[in-house]
Image (spheres, rainbow, N blue to C red):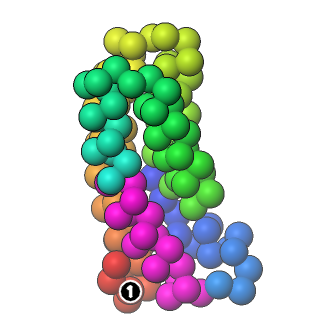
Amino acid sequence: MKAFNLDAVLEEMLGLEAEDMADIYKSFLTEIKDLEKNIQEKLFLKDWEKLRTLLHTIKGMSGNLRVDRIFTKAKLLEQYLIRGEINNLEEGIGQLSLEIIEGEKEIKEAFALKKIII
């Protein structure tokens, strides 16, 4: 499963061109990296409430922008946290970091195919 499909997003966002969406995705990539750093910190501090808020934010952002693998992983991590499955949570956060890297790569590649650099 690909992390991102720009053509599907553009089809859903009637009236918006790829150029219109580029700034939104550029902001998304910046914000998600900041959130990821905060997640690592909150995990280390065992600040479960703030960690849940951060995961929920990533889930919402990635879901709204159809970055599916990041959305799916953030949703799973939020469930691990709710159920108190801390070992699964710790392992999953490492996997989330990999999904973010892959998602960024796929987003940039999708826009590059449309001759847009983000």
Q: Position of residue 56 (x, y in %)?
A: 55, 39
Image point (35%, 12%), residue name? 87
Find numbered disc 1 in the image and state the secondary structure of the residue it sits on: loop
Occupied quadrant, residue 96:
top left
Would you place residue 113 above or below residue 34 in this image? below
Question: Which residue is farthest right?
Answer: 14
Magenta span includes 30 = yes
Q: Is residue 35 left or right of residue 94?
A: right
Image point (49%, 47%), residue name? 58
Image point (37%, 89%), residue name? 115
Residue, disc 1: 116
**Residue in the foreground of this view, choosing between 10 and 28:** 28
Q: Position of residue 25 (x, y in %)?
A: 46, 70
Magenta span includes 95 = no
Can the viewer see residue 60? yes
Q: Position of residue 53 (x, y in %)?
A: 52, 37
Q: Residues within 10 Å of mark 1 (few under 14, many from 20)?
A: few
The quarter of the picture where the C terminus appears is: bottom left
Q: Which residues are magenta?
A: 17-33
Can the viewer see residue 1? no
